[in-house]
Amino acid sequence: MTSRKRDQWIIGVLVAAMLIVLTALMQIHFHGGGISGTTYREVIEHEIWHLQNAVSLYYLHTNEYPSHLEDLRTDPGIRGWRGPYTHRLEDPFGDTYLYENVNGDVVITSLAGGTEGGPITSKGME
């Protein structure tokens, strides 16, 4: 075996070993508890914040609040609608965010797939 072929073989073996290690680490991270409840909570809080902003922008454009969150994604036929204002209405667990509007007091909640900390809500997130 020439020196060049031997070097190529060693590089090939090293690359294959690195791919095996990276694949194992990804499996552990995504399927073995690598994403903690705190991280999920932070992601959900960020998404709720994004939805709150989308509701505010919807209100600025239409001068009324959406009847339900789907109005942020699909044109409800209201004058001034310039959306879609968001594309994602589900939390990381696939559950739809809950939307409540009482006289302009908008609350968005995620049941967070049963997160130990309880429901995550926009109330008090300002």
Image: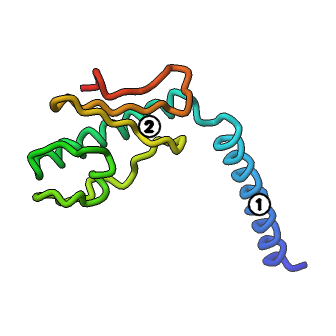
Q: Residues within 10 Å of mark 2 (few under 14, many from 20)?
A: some
Q: What residue is shown at x 27% (from left), y 58% (from top)?
A: 84
* Occupied quadrant, residue 79: bottom left
Picture coordinates of residue 121, whole percent (x, y): 36, 27
Q: Secondary structure at mark 1?
A: helix
Q: What residue is shown at x 30% (from left), y 42% (from top)?
A: 51
The three-letter amino acid code for the residue at tag 2 is Val
Nearest to viewer (mark 2 / mark 1): 2
Residue furthest to the right in view is 1
Picture coordinates of residue 73, whole percent (x, y): 31, 56
Q: Is 89 positioned to the left or the right of 55 in the image?
A: right
Q: Is 73 positioned to the left or the right of 9 in the image?
A: left
- Could you tell me how many numbered marks the image carries? 2
The three-letter amino acid code for the residue at tag 1 is Leu
Q: Secondary structure at mark 2?
A: helix
Residue toward you, 25 or 83: 83
Residue toward you, 19 or 106: 106
Picture coordinates of residue 11, whole percent (x, y): 75, 66
Picture coordinates of residue 58, whole percent (x, y): 18, 49
Q: What residue is shown at x 78% (from left), y 57% (from top)?
A: 17
Q: Is 18 positioned to the left or the right of 70 in the image?
A: right
Q: What residue is shown at x 28% (from left), y 21% (from top)?
A: 124
Looking at the rendered structure, which numbered label has been put on residue 43?
2
123 relative to 66, above or below: above
Q: Residues within 10 Å of mark 1 (few under 14, many from 20)?
A: few
Q: Which residue is mark 1?
A: 14
